[in-house]
Amino acid sequence: MSKLAAQDKFLDLSDYGRTFGRFLANQLKHTRCTPIHVTLLFGLSGLIAIYCILQKHYFLAGCFIVLKSGIDAADGELARLKKTPSYSGRYLDSLFDIVLNFLLLMTICYVSNATIGFTLLAFIGLQLQGTLYNYYYVILRNKSVGGDTTSKVFEYKTPKALPGETQKTVNVLFGLYTLLYGGFDKIIHAIDPDAYKVKTFPNWFMTLLSLYGLGFQLLIMAVMLPLGWIEFIVPFFSAYTFLILALVGIRKTLIS
């Protein structure tokens, strides 16, 4: 099931792993494998990529980063196929993403000449970029007709557990999610507080916005590593953050 109605579908440059994700989910549909197992698998792929960077096997690192994006697309697909959406899976997925992003950049810092301070700046930028993408994308999904029931535009209140998960688990994972993502969410909401009032976002804008999707961010890393551009990864993502001003400016000026 698509997350968007037909008229709202756009070319998502960050979603190149969707075809593989659907294939994997279909292979697992009639097995005991759960979406949580798939989330753990993409976490493992990310950790292998980090190990490869430490060993300076940059081509392999890039391959596992791309594989991580493909597997990342499979957990949600599997949840929709099995009709087992859960807040636990949704928050665990996000927690794995932010931890792996941090570890990836810190590993790159370790093997390159980047400073810790500059790397932390790049990490903050990376998360703000992804938060802007998710903010507008979730707004679009909530105004469209799709299959995602666990994502909300403003997540300030602990949700009620869905069938198959415990409220205690949801409480813990939501608390961690709020701790790690809450600050980024508040910054992006403050930059464009009226975005949720928009009737819809045009397809061209969403395609442009997908430059900030996590999949595309990881693809940039996966390409830069084997090209020998590891020294430029931290500066790139620091500078890449300034595109936020242009994207928000376009939204406020042209889309209402």
Image (cartoon, rainbow, N blue to C red):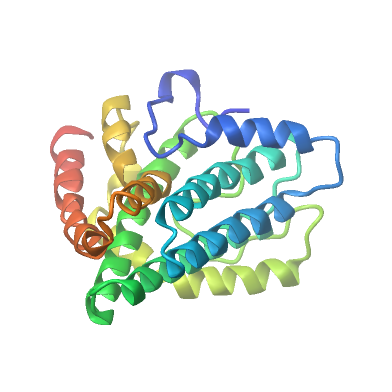
In the foreground, 74 or 135: 74
Q: Position of residue 184 (x, y in %)?
A: 35, 66
Name which quarter of the figure residue 252 lies in: top left
Q: Is residue 240 left or right of residue 46?
A: left
Is any atom of residue 82 visible in this view? no
Image location of residue 223, percent across then percent down: 34, 46
Q: Quadrant of the C terminus?
A: top left
Q: Is residue 203 visible?
A: yes
Give the residue at the far bottom of this rendering: 116
Marks counted in the figure total 0
- Whole-percent x and y of residue 79? 70, 42
The answer to whether residue 221 is above or below residue 117 is above
Task: State the residue in front, 83 or 105.
Answer: 105
Residue name at image x 39 percent, y 32 percent: 12
Q: Residue at x 32, y 52 (%)?
A: 132
* Residue shown at 63% from the left, 32% from the top: 22
The image shows residue 17, relative to residue 103, as above or below, that is: above
134 with respect to 253 (left or right): right
How far from the left and from the top, in percent, is residue 114? 24, 74
Q: Name the quadrant containing residue 234.
A: bottom left
- Relative placement, left or right, of 160 versus 164 is left
Q: Give the residue displayed 36% in from the left and 54% down from the top.
A: 130
Q: Quadrant of the N terminus?
A: top right
Looking at the image, the residue that sits furthest to the top is: 7
